[in-house]
Amino acid sequence: MQRPALTNAARPATYEVDAINERGEVVPTPIAGEHPLTLYLDKRELVTLMTLGGAPEALAIGYLRNQRLLRSVEELAAVQVDWETDSVAITTRSGDFWERKGIEDKLGKRTVTSGCGQGTVFGDLMEEIDQVTFPADARLSEEVLYAVMDNVRKYESIYKQAGAVHGCALCANSGERGEIMMFVEDVGRHNAVDAIAGQMWLDGLTGGDKIFYTTGRLTSEMVIKCAQMGIPFLLSRSGLTQMGHEIAERTGITMIGRCQGKHYLLFTGKQRFSKTLGTQYA
């Protein structure tokens, strides 16, 4: 795979400010960063995202992937972040993105979603949902589910220091350990999932043997992005929306919400989930 030229321009995750507590004491307190990042694709402005700035190159690539604007990371020649101008210059190898047939129509067709931080979907991604397939033998055991929940709980996150962020994790679905392969936090959960999608492209990772965990609610856009990444298992400590549930059923994603402690709710894809004693739901 031919990788694009990349900067390495992560920003600090937290900044320290003074706050006054209930006793009138001045307390140095970490807060989460937030920065505008404008994406320029082949020299034309595309969108501005508000981001923590921890993985700006992967975020830009994942945004293009999940908006279905590019089909392969190999289309990219360079992704260059410049925080002096709060921008990222993305260059395709052909340099003809804006001349492609139908691209203006696709960019003009926007669906406003319920997401925070970044909540629009370019084009009609629902038209592509029926093309999504997952490995026929994909299974998730209760042991691995609990392992993922425990690994996320113990993870040293920015949220524990400063709050105000959402986190997403890509986890292995092998053995019984549910190891965290990537963990990304950002001011919006959509940015976090896009950053993981971009890094998966860069690393050549497929999603069929992976689990995706998010701290945020499972809306339609989150389910669509997980499906586009080819990941059959979607977990959240939060709840879900009616549209998210409908799309998960349509794609066949195994979606589990309210994952905290030893509690969880299995909403869709029960045929691929096994209880501790090996019971598989009918």
Image (tube, rainbow, N blue to C red):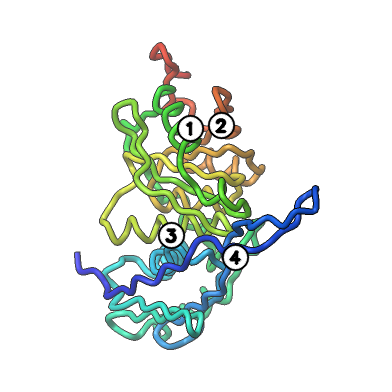
Q: In x, y percent, where is residue 59?
A: 44, 65
Q: How far is disc 2 from disc 3 in space, using C-alphas? A: 23 Å
Q: Amino acid at mark 1?
A: Met
Q: Nearer the viewer, mark 4 or mark 2?
A: 2
Choose between 126 and 167: the one closer to the eye.
167
| Dot placed on the residue nearer the N-terminal end, 4 or 2 | 4
User: Residue 260: which disc?
Assistant: none
Choose between 68 and 182: the one closer to the eye.
182
User: Residue 149: which disc?
Assistant: 1
Q: Amino acid at mark 4?
A: Thr
Q: Nearer the viewer, mark 4 or mark 3?
A: 3
Task: Check disc 1: other Cα within 10 Å, few if <14, some if 14-19, many if 20+.
Answer: many
User: Residue 195: which disc?
Assistant: 3
| Dot placed on the residue nearer the N-terminal end, 2 or 1 | 1
| Dot placed on the residue nearer the N-terminal end, 2 or 3 | 3
Q: In x, y percent, where is residue 265?
A: 58, 27
User: Relative to 278, is 60 above or below?
Assistant: below
Residue 49: tell me if it is visible: yes
Secondary structure at numbered mark 2: strand
Q: Is residue 40 left or right of residue 221?
A: left
Secondary structure at numbered mark 4: strand
* Residue drawn 75% across the image and 53% down it: 25
Q: Amino acid at mark 2?
A: Cys
Q: Amino acid at mark 3?
A: Ala
Q: In x, y percent, where is residue 163?
A: 61, 51
| Dot placed on the residue nearer the N-terminal end, 4 or 3 | 4
Q: Which residue is mark 2?
A: 259
Task: Check disc 4: other Cα within 10 Å, few if <14, some if 14-19, many if 20+.
Answer: some
Q: Which residue is mark 4?
A: 120
